[in-house]
Amino acid sequence: MYAILDIETTGGKYNEEGITEIAIYQHDGLQVTDQFISLVNPERAIQPFVEKLTGINGKMLRSAPRFFEVAKRIIEITENCLIVAHNAEFDYRILRTEFKRLGFKFERNSLCTVSISQALLPEMDSYKLGKLVRSLGIPISDRHRAQGDALATVKLFELLLEKDSSKQILKSQIKALHTHQAPSKYLSIIEELPTATGVYYLHNTVGDVLYIGKSKNIQKRVRTHLTGKDRKSKKIQKKLHKVNFETTGSELIALLKEQHEIKKNQPRINKDGRYLLYPMGIRIDNKTPYHQLILEQVRKRRDYLTVFKNGRVAKHIMTQWMESHQLCYKYSSLKDSDEACYAFIDNQCKGACLEEEDPQNYNKRLHQLRDKNNYPHDHFLMIENGRKDGEYSYIYIENQCFKGYGFYELNHQINNKEKILKRMIAMDDNSDCRALILAHIKKNKFRKLIPLGASKVSSH
């Protein structure tokens, strides 16, 4: 038996949400056998964006039953059933939270139609409920209302049951629920963690940091540590006592914080990030008339055009640059001769190795290469999502140097340097930071870049 459900909530802080509407369809694998649909008075305010999305407002809920008044019916209709929902992790968490407030432990196994759809329908462009069911020809009405979304999930689940003729997907999911269950002593730790983007810190009994990580879903990532069978997971499970976290909203800020905190705290189980994420770098040495392109292990207080995780990739990129910019191998760390380099013999070098090319012209091409690998502006803010609705985050670059990050809600809070610095959490700049930020920019994974100068920050 299955209990296919959808829940609408008030929104708000993690584990402080309340249910505003619930729809449950009991299903025997062939047809609906029972149903329960009700508005619920959450006894707390609804976030404005949620009210706009669902159409459910406080006035509609004044006379609706409170959760304790419908709890018995929910227990009855879901008893001996697998909970099925689109993003089951969210709906199941909300139900457990509401029951926990009543002092009742609500436990059911669950299946997620998102992950089942991804396995059985790998060709789909989107797995969001609305887009997915429309692309499959499944009608959906009252979108973002519990009954409409739950009915669409019923039709989707029936289709998935048909496609999974061997029932291997369902078997594997049910098996996974049992074999990857976190030990009971960790359940309270996991329940307190958000499903948001951020950095988490695993501590032992005396408070020392064992491990630092980042994730787009902190709760899910920590759960993998506590259910994993690999060597690192076993070390964590043996010593873990407490988990702290900081949400960031922005994946880039989470990456920057993670590498910064690992270098600063040197956690025992973090081996990969203690030193440099990108240990190989290419830089320009200007100590000779013909400036040289150097590939080397990254050193402090040296500026690099770009950095790499391994020397093989770095050498490949450097060779491409040498060819595309007609640079001389004699004036590089790839030097092959004190005479004419082989690139000159192949007419790919303009003769710097024989001093036939003017150093100024040669160096100009190196500077063009440097400019291509710089930040797009000397001074700018990169705007990204914040930790909650209505909030934004920013990365601050000054004189091509990363200074830190911060959060704001109103544009006037960051419309000059003084205000930017007041809200900013300062961080050390290094080649890892530069590589992470440049990669983010190249992939266009930000809301806006705002060049800074005399002008003020524009509105969003």
Image (spheres, rainbow, N blue to C red):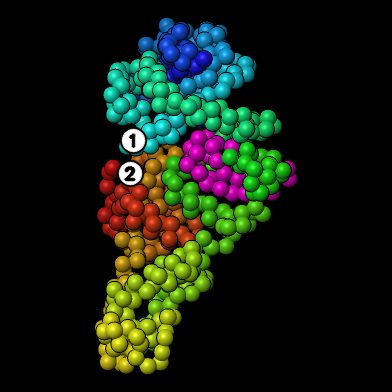
Q: Residue furthest front?
A: 166
* Local crowd size for mark 1, using a 10 Å CA cut-off: few (<14), some (14–19), many (≥20): few
The answer for how far apart the CA atoms under marks 1 and 2 are is 39 Å
Tell which circle, 1 or 2, labels the residue nearer the N-terminal end: 1
Q: Residue at x 59, y 37 (%)?
A: 223
Q: Residue at label 1?
A: 124
Q: Residue at x 35, y 65 (%)?
A: 374
Q: Amino acid at mark 2?
A: Asn
* Local crowd size for mark 2, using a 10 Å CA cut-off: few (<14), some (14–19), many (≥20): few
Q: Amino acid at mark 1?
A: Met
The spot of residue 336 in percent (x, y) is: 42, 86
The answer to the question of whether label 1 and label 2 lie on touching residues, with beta carbons closer than 8 A, is no
- SS under mark 2: helix
Q: Give the camera-side residue of 410 and 215.
A: 215
Instruction: Tell whether 266 sits left or right of 218.
Output: right
Q: Quadrant of the C terminus?
A: top left
Q: Quadrant of residue 341?
A: bottom left
Instruction: Tell whether 236 sits left or right of 419.
Output: right
For residue 411, the mark is 2
Q: Where are the magenta residues, as a range? A: 194-223
Relative vertical location of residue 248 with respect to residue 148 in this rendering, above or below? below
